[in-house]
Each structure stands twice: as structure tokens, then as C-alpha cells.
Amino acid sequence: MNGSSVGYVSEKGTIMKMLARMTAAELLKLYRRRGLMAWSVALFVGGQIVFYGLGAIQHAADPAHHAPAGGSRGLANAMMLVSYLGGVAAVMIGTAAGGGDTAAGVFRDLASTGRSRVALFAVRVPAALMVTGVLAAASFAITAAGAIVFAGAGPAPSAAVLAQCGLAVAVTIGLTTVLAVGLSSLLSSRSITIGLLLCWTLALARIMEHAAGLGSLRESLSIVAEDRLVPVSVGGAYVVPISVWTAALVLLVWAALALLAGASQTARRDA
Amino acid sequence: MGGGHGEISVLGMNMTAVPRGATGNGAVIETAGLTKRFRDRIAVAGLDLRVPGGCAYGLLGPNGAGKTTLIRMVLGLTSVTSGTVRLLGMPMPAARSRALSMIGAIVDEPRFHPHLTGRENLRVAAAVRGPEAPRRVEAMLERVGLAERAGDRVGGYSLGMRQRLGIARCLLSDPRLLILDEPMNGLDPAGILQMRHMIRSLVDEGRTVVVSSHLLDEVEKTCDAVAIIDRGKLIAVGPVSELTDGGRQVLIGCDDTSRAAAVLEGRQAGSGLSVVSPGVLRVTPGQGVTVAAVNQWLVEAGISVDRLEPVRATLEERFLEITSRLEATR
């Protein structure tokens, strides 16, 4: 027996190693949730496969009434699917990362190790982002491939458009994940967080976006910023036109607020 | 009310004694005036506690006495309303990180991620500890007898297995101090025995083990010293042997209990004179009255004495006695 005090003290110079170890542990907690992973794959990837599959069959069966599944129009629809279905999966994964320890009752044990609570919170973010990142990448790969393969006689989306769409997917899914991690850490409840975030992204934010009476306040909505990153040729005209830099700033503020709230509550809450 | 290492203090009565295994070590936990208030309810009230090192120390009290709240404050898991805590000689919360790195604790029942295996749960816990902790995972699984089931999901573990896995998690950091909250809860007799042996083996290695429990019998069998807490207050503290020795009652076996009672009454031998079973009297000898004198008086009166046995009160009896005396003073 020597006590592990030396452990914490001697690793001051290797904080990155420690964070990497903790992040790997968070990853383990996430990817071993079989149900969560299965549903996330279904939402991220299954939706795209079904969409292009059905679209291709319909076009093949009745080209006069059904446009090709791919091309710019197909890409626009597939992007919407990624945004909605992938967003739901990102919320589920983010809340599992943010509220998993509390739900399982192990946060108290982690806190009683003396490890910084901010660090305990912080490692949840990259772990969740890695999982959603991989799934979003797979989903977008199918989206892009489908848009090209099933473009039919029409033009396939250009590489520049696809790159912009890829960036938009990455940012949208990334922000949703960060919001889910932060909010579930703040509220210590997965179910409430899932409900609130789905209500926000699928309904309330869209309603507010179209509420002209809110004026320039709408520019601070996260979905306005996310939509701004989608090329006009794919997403159509912007409901609330803002500059890319404004969009970037809005997204950063939303992410920062979520992280700050989650970290602050994790550091202060009774365990 | 304060109590310290080597001193038994029960409602103002002080005796000196040194708990087994505590000699020469400093206090591992020291609290002064520790208080926790939840709105208008006081869970812990001005508690002064000093836990000596190198022993098994029991925190005894009924459910709701404030034991878990005390542990949570000591570990910095909840804020302190007032008072101070020192852990392994270090002030809390200033030296929280350093102090807690040398401590393993189970607060309430041990909880784990049910979808992970026992081994994976330990890997997750080890990642939060020092760099040496991951290398101790297999050894600790072996130590608590879970090596063969380490690949099973914890969701399928019995409570006893989870208790043992909890101990393994505590030991990952090779701690100097272990704080176990109700470790016997839900265990079957074999599991209780196993846990008792494990706690004693940890103490034999030089660690201090603080065991919180409402099971008086278990604390008596496992711990060297004990602090009794009731309604957030420390009401008795000291070595178990001293606490259980407090009554000084004597059982007297003789051929004529009514005559023996009359003789002892006439001699004002003590109090609490009663016949507990046919041919057996119980008395608490008064100040200055020895068991030998009691025997001599009875023999001189022509009573044949076949048994003179000091009664060793169980911790349970002492606990009830102390709490009822305390109740009477309220």
C-alpha cells in the first residue's frame, strides 16, 4: 500500500495522457450501449439507405412521375434526413454521455476520487463527438454517394457543394451533440433533456425562425446559423439571411453556453 | 461532545483506552463542529470526530442518523454548512484532490454501469485514478474473487458481487483509507463473513477502514473502535471492547435466589437486582463492591454459589442503553 497520491501529483506533466485515458473510458461507456448504438446507426445510416433505395426503385418503376433519387434535389432531401434523424441520434448519444454517470449512480464514485469535476465533464464532450462524428461521416458518405450515383440524367452535385454540405452536417450534428451533453449534465436527467432538445430543434426553433415579429432576435437561433451553412442550391433561400461569420459566432456562443452550464453544474452539484 | 483516539466518552463518562491497531498512527479523519443543514432540518449537528489510523472504525447509528451525510461531507461530495474536515491530515476542501487520491470510498450501495462488465467498470474507474490504477484491475478482481465473472455484465451481478466489485474499485488506487457505507447491506451470511474477513485483511495491511452501519452486531465483530451517531450527533465514541464492557453487571448462580437477593440488598451490594432465570440473579455491583466481596457475603450467609459471571453487554444493548439515556435527558 502506498496510496495513489503520487499518482495524481506525478502526472501533472501528462495531463493529456490522463484526459486521453478518461476519454477512452467515456467512449467505452457509450459504444457498449448496444441499444443506443443500434438505434443511432439506424437513424444515421438506415434513413439514408431507405431514402435512396425507395427513391431509386420509384424512379426506375415510373421515371415520368418520380425524379431521380439523387442529384441536387435528392441531396437536399437527404440532407434534411441527416439533419433530423441524425439530430435525434445525436441527442440520444449526447445525453447518454452527459447524464450517463448520474443515471447509473456512479457520478458520486467518480467525484469521490478527487479528480477534477470539470475534467469529468470535459471528457464527455470529445467522447460523444467521436461517436456522433463517425456516424455522421458514414451517413454523409451515403448521402453524397447517393446524390452522385442516383443523379440520373441530371447533373450530380459538385465537389464544392458536397464539401459545404459535409461541413454543414458536421456542424449541425456536432452542435446538437454538445448541446445534449451540456444540457443533460446541467439537468441531470436524460429524459427531460431529450424532450427539451427535440422540442427545440424539431418545433420551437422552427416556429421562432418563421416568426417575423421576433425581428433580428431570430439571428441568434442555432438553426438559423446551421441552415446558413447549407448551400442555397441545396437548402433553398435562407429564411433569416445572416453572414457566415455571424453564423459561426452564433454557433460558438450556443456551444460555449452549453459547455459552461454543464461544467458549472457538474462542478457544483451535490454528489 | 467530543471524543478522541484512545478515549471512550459516553454521555460525559470518560475512560482511556487505545483501539487495537491504532497505536502510533495519526488521525485519518478529523472533524470539528461539522454541521449540515438541509433547509430547516439539521442532518449533522456540530460533530467532532477523530478517527485513528490503522484500524477498522465503525460509524454506528440507526437509519437516518446522519452517517451517510457525514461521509459525503468528509469526502467533499456535499457542501458543509459549518465546521472543518481534515482528511489524512489535509484540510478539506483545499487539499481535496490530493487527499481523495489516497482514499477509496463506497457511499450508499455500490453503483456501476449495468451495461458494462465488471472488468470494464473497473477500467472506467481506473481511468479516473492515477496512471498505475489500470494495471491493478486484474489483481483487484482476483482479490475480491470476481476474476471468473469479470466478463459478465454488472447488470446480472448479485448485490454481494456488486459489494465486492465496489471494494475492488476502492482498492484500485491502493488507498490508505477506505470508507465503506453499509457494506454488509443485503449480503447473505456467507457474504457478510467474507466481507468481514476482507475488511480485517485490509486493516492487517495497514489501511484504515471506516465502516458505516446500522448493524450493531457486525460493527462489533468487525471494528476496533466505534462512534455512535444519532440524530446527527455523536453520542458515544471509543473502542468496542470498552463500549461493550460498560455495564459491569454480574450473573450469580446459587441455590436460593430469594435469600441471596435479601443478603445483597442488606449489604447494599448494588442496583438492578433481579432474578433472570431459576437459580440465577443479576446485579450491578455498586461503587467499590467487588465480585469477590459479593461471593464472600453469600457464602458467609450459607448460600451455595455455583456461578459468578460478569455480563458483557452487546454493542446493541449498549447502543439502546445510551440512546434511551439520551432520550431521557431530552
Image: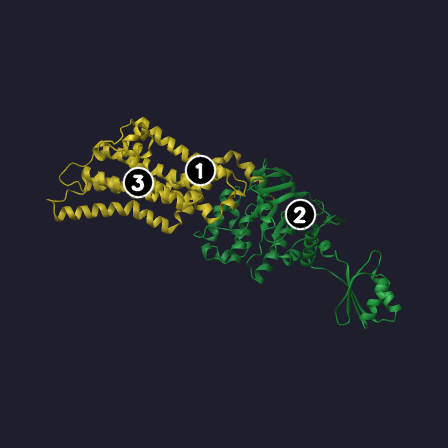
Chain colours: A yellow, B green
In this view, the residue in front, B160 or B284, is: B284
Q: Secondary structure at mark 1?
A: helix
B196 relative to B104, above or below: below
Type of residue at label 1?
A: Gly
Q: Amino acid at mark 2?
A: Leu
Q: Are dots 2 and 1 in contact, CB under 8 Å?
A: no
Have a look at marks 2 and 1 and say if they share a chain.
no
Name the spot of residue B175 as percent of width and height, x first.
Answer: 59, 46
Tag 3–tag 2 contact (CB < 8 Å): no
Q: Position of residue A263 (x, y in %)?
A: 46, 36
Q: Residue A209 at x, y = what percent?
A: 29, 34
Quarter location, residue B188: bottom right
Q: Earlier in the sequence, mark 1 or mark 3?
A: 3
Judging by the rendered image, the residue that carries numbered circle 2 is: B234
Regarding residue B231, the answer to whether it shows in the image is yes
User: Residue beneath label 3, please?
Assistant: A203
Q: CA distance from mark 3 to mark 2?
A: 56 Å
Which one is nearer the viewer's eye here, A210 or B140? A210
